[in-house]
Image: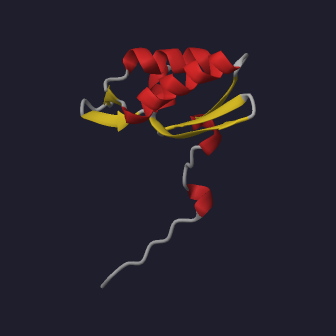
Amino acid sequence: MLEQTTTSVSDLEIAPLSSNVVSIKSDSLEDQEQLEAQLSFLQKASLRLMHRNGTKATLLVLERWKTSDNEIQIVFTPGVVEALGSLEGRELLKAAMNAATA
């Protein structure tokens, strides 16, 4: 006899997508070009992580990024922001650059 189980959406723990999204305003065209160069590197880079249970994982750092006017919106791969700590904006980008491997 098969037992049917159902799980409602309210029973699931869902992380908000916005925790992986960071916006950085560029101060000048030169600043924007420098940020875009860093993001181009990070788009191909990965990050080695160790889970609490001891297993290792390799994650791509970024899912995507886009530029609009003087603002850059960055979408990190889930888990990367949590692994780097409670940083914001440029500090998070700097930490990702230091931790990433190409």
Total of numbered circles in the picture? 0
Q: Is residue 68 left or right of residue 19?
A: right
Visible residue check, residue 16: no
Of 44 and 86, the residue lying toward us? 44
Q: Is residue 19 left or right of residue 61?
A: right
Visible residue check, residue 49: yes
Question: Looking at this rendering, what residue extends furthest in the bottom direction?
Answer: 1
Q: Is residue 19 left or right of residue 97?
A: right
Question: Looking at this rendering, what residue extends furthest in the left direction?
Answer: 55
Q: Residue 72: horizontal and vertical position, in percent? A: 65, 31
Q: Residue 102: horizontal and vertical position, in percent? A: 31, 26
Of 68 and 74, the residue lying toward us? 68
Q: Quadrant of the N terminus?
A: bottom left
Question: Looking at this rendering, what residue extends furthest in the front direction?
Answer: 29
Q: Is residue 12 above or below residue 22?
A: below
Q: Is residue 63 above or below residue 4?
A: above
Q: Residue 76: horizontal and vertical position, in percent? A: 51, 35
Q: Is residue 78 above or below residue 47?
A: below
Q: Which residue is painted at 37% across and 78% down in the image?
A: 3
